[in-house]
Image (cartoon, rainbow, N blue to C red):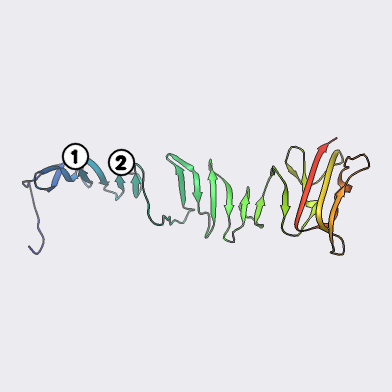
């Protein structure tokens, strides 16, 4: 048969009216196409609605009330890439009903991790990672206190006086006179740039005084800094 077919009224396998249906197989009256309301189309299998297309074009899978272009009620298995394309920071929520926690694309080629509506981690297009900052300018840029449970290994040139650690394990920007510190830096450079095997600061009684004892040297690559401070 060539050409169009136009059916008005009932057919032998369906019904007409406000809730019109069209069965898709002979003697199979629980699978087919249904029009429950004006402008709405549904697909049924085994007497159960599986797909709904609203009059506004929203499509629902497993739901009778889709609220987005595509609404899926249930698990979804994606075997290829999953992408979003939007002008206003497209995001992927990580939990059902939790729309302020997930992954976002805040700008071109950048990724952020948000919890409770607040961004906490930013990965820039250059691979730099920011914790508490959305503009990291180091490989790891931490805006706030950081706790290190073991040794800190330095693999690039830095200044020893940039790093201080209180006994609570929180980084501070500078030492105060009421702190007693234990400072030891292995394999540092002297003022001439020559390597020194070890440089430590301590007093005769084994205690360590503050500020002035921090070695004013540049830490060489591969050096280890150990700084422990406590208030007197």
Tell me the quadrant of the picture where the N terminus can be found. bottom left
In the figure, 119 relative to 128: above or below?
Answer: above
Q: Quadrant of residue 154?
A: bottom right
**Mark 1 residue crowding within 10 angstroms, few (<14) / some (14–19) / many (20+):** few
The picture places residue 119, in percent across and down from the top left corner, at 57, 47
Q: Earlier in the sequence, mark 1 or mark 2?
A: 1
Q: Nearer the viewer, residue 153 or 22?
A: 153
**Marks 1 and 2 in Cβ contact (< 8 Å):** no
Residue ranking furthest to the front:
197
Residue under label 1, please give it. 47
The picture places residue 166, in percent across and down from the top left corner, at 77, 40
Viewer-side label of 1, 2: 1
**Mark 2 residue crowding within 10 angstroms, few (<14) / some (14–19) / many (20+):** some
In the shown orientation, is residue 40 left or right of residue 151? left
The picture places residue 211, in percent across and down from the top left corner, at 86, 46
Mark carried by residue 128: none
Circle 2: element type: loop
Circle 1: element type: loop
In the shown orientation, is residue 121 left or right of residue 3? right
Residue under label 2, please give it. 65
The picture places residue 85, in percent across and down from the top left corner, at 43, 57
Residue ranking furthest to the right:
204
Q: Residue at x 72, y 47 (%)?
A: 151
Q: Nearer the viewer, residue 8 or 196?
A: 196
């Amino acid at each position: 048969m060539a050409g169009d077919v136009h059916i008005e009224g009932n057919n032998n396998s369906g019904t007409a009216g406000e809730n019109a249906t069209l069965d898709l197989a002979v003697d199979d009256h629980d699978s087919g196409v249904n029009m429950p309301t004006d402008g709405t189309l549904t697909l049924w299998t085994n007497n159960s609605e599986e797909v709904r297309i609203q009059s506004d074009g929203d499509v629902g899978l497993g739901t009778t009330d889709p609220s987005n272009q595509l609404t899926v009620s249930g698990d979804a298995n994606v075997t290829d890439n999953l992408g979003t394309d939007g002008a206003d920071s497209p995001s992927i929520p990580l939990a059902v009903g939790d729309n302020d926690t997930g992954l976002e694309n805040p700008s071109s080629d950048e990724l952020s991790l948000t919890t409770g509506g607040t961004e906490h981690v930013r990965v820039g297009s250059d691979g730099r990672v920011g914790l508490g900052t959305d503009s990291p300018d180091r490989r790891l840029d931490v805006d706030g206190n950081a706790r290190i449970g073991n040794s800190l290994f330095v693999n690039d040139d830095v200044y020893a006086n940039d790093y201080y650690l209180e006994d609570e394990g929180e980084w501070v920007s500078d030492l105060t006179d009421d702190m007693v510190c234990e400072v030891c830096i292995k394999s540092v450079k002297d003022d001439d740039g020559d390597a020194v095997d070890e440089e430590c600061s301590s007093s005769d009684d084994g205690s360590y005084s503050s500020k002035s004892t921090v070695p004013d040297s540049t830490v060489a690559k591969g050096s280890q800094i150990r700084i422990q401070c406590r208030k007197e």
